Amino acid sequence: MAAHQDAFQVDHERIAQLALATYHNDLPPRGAKPGTKSNLRLEWTVLAAFVLSFPSPHSNQHEYALISLATGLKCLPYTSLPPNGDVLHDQHAEVLARRGARQWLLQRLVHEVKSGVDGGGALALFEPAVGGSEPKWKLNKGVRLHLYVSTLPCGDASSKLLEFQRAAQDQVAGKKDAITPTELLELHIQGTKSSDGTLPAFDASGDRSVVRGRASSSHQYATSSGALRTKPGRPDSPPSICMSCSDKLALWNAPGIGIQGSLLSSLFQPIYIHSITLCDHPTRHIFPAFPPSKERADKNGEQREALKRLLAQECRRALSRAAPGKDLVVGWSTTPFAHSKEAQAEMVWSAFHPNPSERLEAEAQARFKDCEPVTCPNSIVYVADSTMAGTRGKIENLATGTKLGAPTKRPKDPQLQRSLPLKPPARSSLCRLNLFQSFVTAHASITGIQAAKATPLLYSDAKQGSFGDGTKAYRRTKAELLGGKEEAAQRVQKFLAGARDGTAIQAAVLPDRVKRLTTRKMPP
């Protein structure tokens, strides 16, 4: 069995097909899936899913099971964050899928503990962790966590892809003196060969600022590898303090962190992402998939493969900044996601020109701009059945952080004159408030320790370690990486004061304070 474990190879196509099959077969066609707007413009979104692989109890092969899936690419601005923890701040697919995975892991542990699963016949995904004064669990030997994303995560991991997409757009538009994708690829390959291969550290040392979204090329850090970024968004929209998916993924794989979060750290040892599977669809129109000659087709195929190697290396670098010693596996799937930006754009292109790789006439280009696909404002979350008995999982349709179509008027406390949390029908099961309530119940079921009923149990108490030292250790490690509460507040104020025109952060403090504030790893 040991030799079999060492020879494990990630099946990226299988992971992608599992995610896509769940999306198309288990989620209803209506709800929060992308559709067609009233002006006939198609919507697109990003798909992400967490998958577990484990040794099959019936053969020497590995089995794969999807545990959570989500779509989305929106987040709330800082001014819209409620204090009650009843609204989801970040609705990007990777973040929602991670929240769903945490819920699944907690429910699965409850199932295994209550049913007495010990690996003697039933599937055991967890085993007790040795050592420590409190009962904790870890993933069983051979069990690995994988992430599927239908495109490169926003932020640092996708910065080079954006360069190539802009170059391809300029080439199609016939811009004079613009660098072509072929020339850009040669430049990057030469730069890779000349570098020493050292990964930039996951920090914000020196005078580096935080870049808002994709920023503009005029900002000195806008295109630099390793730049910390908030989520992309319209330049005229209110700023969000939500960090990019690249930065969040890098944080989750940092030593001592993991995807389980601080609360679940009282029950679990850190759970890390073993591999990430990406869809290669975004690369297909950079080097056209349908050139006029076979010779050109062969050349473009070679260039696409070289580009995929370059982008995979860049993604690995970006997501391993906090753990440069870990070897994150990055691979590609050739199966397209039907509601991706590229797939929806192809549908629009086909109405103007049968071959999207050929140069479009100026009139057709202008018409395409008027019909270009737009982002879907809604999200879907799917959490699989934790018993793995074949029952369909739980589905939620979300909009602006709450359940789609639910009333969002908050009741008020007449004595305190403040808003109360949203009513349960409006709240997502993955919001901070509901997840905390689920955790309290699950913790008692797993450990047999009932919380004291004399005083109300507060979320802040749980985050400070009232459920165990694992939460304290997690928060201590995170504080060492990101900075403490006071510094976090200073960073937020600095960010909000300096955010302008959707470009970058301009320091709104004295130079000596800038240097002091940027010595930590990353703003929370």
Image (tube, grey):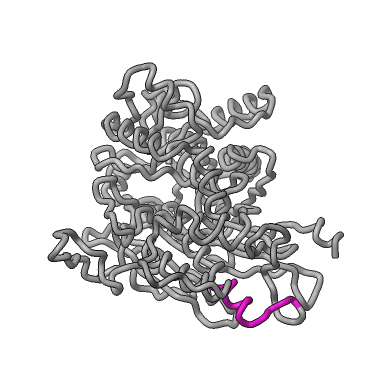
Left or right position of 409 against 292: left
Look at the picture and state if 294 lies above or below 274: above
Residue 356 highlighted magenta (yes or no)? no
Q: Who's the residue at 37% across and 33% down the image? A: 491
Residue 271 placement (x, y as % from top left): 61, 56
Residue farthest toward the top in the current orientation of the protein: 511
Residue farthest toward the front in the current orientation of the protein: 454
Residue 158 placement (x, y as % from top left): 50, 41
Residue 447 placement (x, y as % from top left): 58, 72
Residue 105 placement (x, y as % from top left): 56, 67
Position of the C terminus by quadrant: top left
User: Can see residue 9?
Assistant: yes
Residue 118 highlighted magenta (yes or no)? yes
The tally of labels here is 0
Left or right position of 319 against 169: right
Part of the protein shown in magenta: 107-119
Look at the picture and state if 202 lies above or below 312: above
Left or right position of 258 against 171: right
Q: Name the foreground residue: 191 vs 391.
A: 391
Q: Who's the residue at 19% across and 65% down the image? A: 410
User: Can see residue 350?
Assistant: no
Give the main secondary structure of the magenta stretch. helix
Position of the N terminus by quadrant: bottom right
Look at the picture and state if 159 lies above or below 53: above
Q: Name the foreground residue: 249 vs 456.
A: 456
Left or right position of 78 against 268: left
Q: Name the foreground residue: 71 vs 423.
A: 423
Q: Who's the residue at 65% across and 37% down the image? A: 324
